[in-house]
Amino acid sequence: MPNICLTFSTSHPAEKIHQALTRLEGLKAWWTHDVHGHSGEGQILTFTFSNNGSFDMQVIRNNGNQVCWKCIRGPEDWLGTHIEFNIQETPAHNQLMFRHTGWAEENPFFHHCSTKWATFLLSLRDYVETGQGRPFPNDVKIEAIGM
Amino acid sequence: MPNICLTFSTSHPAEKIHQALTRLEGLKAWWTHDVHGHSGEGQILTFTFSNNGSFDMQVIRNNGNQVCWKCIRGPEDWLGTHIEFNIQETPAHNQLMFRHTGWAEENPFFHHCSTKWATFLLSLRDYVETGQGRPFPNDVKIEAIGM
């Protein structure tokens, strides 16, 4: 099955990345301003993008350097897919490995989401490094219709 | 085999995208400032990123809305892979579908290149829309070591 695979590295602390993935104020600072729920394992996080849709993510793993969500409500292409964040610490820097796995096919929405995830990961990186990300609705648009 | 799949759309003319993919001055404006060669089918384009490497791409297709290159010299992971640009014209906008196909595995370099391609496609989009891209060495860096 096709997977979206992305990465960035930063000299900033791994703990800051982890907080940005597990605290509501962190998630609101780089993905979408509208986040509700709880980030403990087994709990549900809800991400809303105004009229563009809403996702429920069940937290499958939250154990420090590994965070994994399973989409249990959202667009059909996302249902059952997993979103994995793996922070790899080295003496020189911290590498975030990102995977959105389990897509059924490499359709146009796969292309769209792959590109959008890249912009959101750089939003996450910027938030970790500067305190300022670009979450929805101030996200980097990649489509002529403003998505 | 894993593939990198990305996209953007723009209300600007498809011809501008095509020129940015086939003219040396276009390629220099969004991917790397150092481009040599010829973009006709069967010919070779050479892209150089200072000390970070150099690629030879054989032009497999250049027929208007489809441009395809095959990597015939470069990093081992890229050898034999194909890079495809497909411009889909609609009345409302033009969609660029991008694929870098034929990777052997989803290794860290696959993650790196997927993210870098996203930044370069947005550089291409910005060049098409504003005349100003972000080619190497002024490209968006995604790694702590400045790549």
Image (spheres, coloured by chain):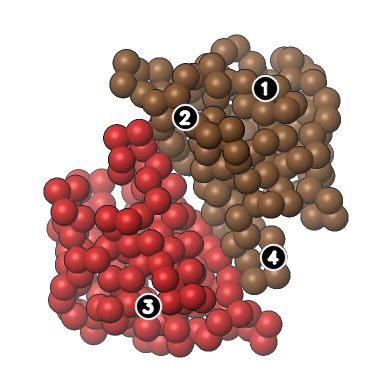
Chain colours: A red, B brown
Do residues under tags 3 and 1 come within 8 Å of each other at their CB atoms?
A: no
Q: Is residue B110 above or below residue B96?
A: below
Secondary structure at badge 1 equals helix
- Residue on which the image places disc 3: A20
Q: Quadrant of the C terminus of chain A?
A: top left
Q: Chain of mark 4?
A: B
Task: Count up the numbered dots.
Answer: 4
* Residue found at x 67% / y 36%: B29
Mark drawn on residue B22: 1
Q: Chain of mark 1?
A: B
Secondary structure at badge 4 equals loop
Classify residue B8 as left or right of residue B21. left
Three-letter residue code for mark 1: Thr
Q: Is residue B95 above or below residue A20?
A: above
Task: Establish whether labels 2 and 1 are both on one chain.
Answer: yes
* CA–CA distance in space, label 2 to label 3: 32 Å
Task: Establish whether labels 3 and 4 are both on one chain.
Answer: no
Three-letter residue code for mark 4: Gly
Task: Establish whether labels 3 and 1 are both on one chain.
Answer: no
Secondary structure at badge 2 equals strand
Q: Chain of mark 2?
A: B
Task: Establish whether labels 4 and 1 are both on one chain.
Answer: yes
Q: Position of residue A125 (x, y in %)?
A: 49, 69
**Crowd class of label 4 (few under 14; some 14 to 19; many from 20; radius 10 Å):** few
- Residue on which the image places disc 2: B96
Task: Establish whether labels 2 and 3 are both on one chain.
Answer: no
Mark drawn on residue B146: 4
* Residue found at x 16% / y 73%: A36
Q: Earlier in the sequence, mark 4 or mark 1?
A: 1
Mark drawn on residue A143: none
Q: Position of residue B37 (x, y in %)?
A: 83, 25
